Amino acid sequence: MSRNIYATYGTVRHNQDLDEILRSAKEEFKEKDFYHWDGGGGPIFGHGVDYLRCIEIYLYDEFPVTRATTDEIYQVIEAHARETGTNDTPVIFIRAGLIKLDTRI
C-alpha cells in the first residue's frame, strides 16, 4: 500500500498513551459517523499507531475530504488526549484506496 500523506498534526513525544487516546476516541468517531461503511458514512476506513509513535488515520481516497474534515477528526482526538493529561497529539492522515481481499484462496 502506498502512503499518500494528506495532512499531519502534532508533535511526537514519548509521554503519550496513543493507543488509549485512539481507543477512547473510537466511540465518538462512530457517533459523528466518521467511519466509512460499504458506501456510507464518513472518510475513515482504518486507524492505528505506527512504530514512530504517531496515530495514523486512513481516509478513503474516493471520499471528499478537506482540511476542515481532518481538523474536525483531529479535534476529537485532541479532546480525548486532554483527558489523559496531554495534547499536541501526533496524527498522520493518509489517503488510500480500500483493501480488496482475494477470497478465492
Image (cartoon, rainbow, N blue to C red):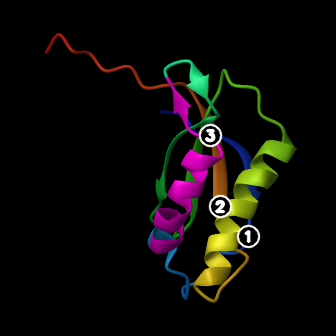
Q: Is residue 103 above or below residue 33?
A: above
Camera-nearest label, 3 or 1: 3
Q: CA distance from mark 1 to mark 2?
A: 6 Å
Determine whether label 1 and label 2 are within 8 Å by CB: yes
Give the image quarter of residue 40.
top right
Residue 12 appears anywhere in the view: yes
Q: Secondary structure at mark 3?
A: loop
Q: Is residue 23 within the magenta segment?
A: yes
Badge 2 density bin: few <14, some 14–19, many ≥20, Cα 10 Å: many
The residue under the point 55% across, 31% down is 36
* Residue at left offset 71%, top offset 53%: 73
| Sequence order check, earlier mark of 1 and 2 | 1
39 left or right of 87 in image: left
Q: Amino acid at mark 2?
A: Val
Q: Amino acid at mark 3?
A: Asp
Query: For mark 1, what is the residue?
Result: 10
Q: Which secondary structure type mostly characterizes the magenta part of the structure?
A: helix
Which span of residues is magenta-colored?
Answer: 20-37
Relative to 99, say whether 103 is above or below.
Answer: above
Horizontally, residue 61 falls left or right of residue 102, namely right
Task: Find out whether residue 81 is within the magenta segment.
Answer: no
How far apart marks 3 and 2 lie (CA) works out to 19 Å
User: In terms of secondary structure, where does tag 1 sit?
Assistant: loop
Left or right, residue 100 beside residue 5: left
Q: Earlier in the sequence, mark 3 or mark 1?
A: 1
- Foreground of the two, 50 or 80: 80
Amino acid at dot 1: Gly
Inter-mark Cα distance, 3 to 1: 24 Å
Of 29 and 101, nearer the camera is 29
Residue drawn at 57 percent across, 65 percent down: 54
Q: Which residue is mark 3?
A: 33
Q: Which residue is mark 2?
A: 91
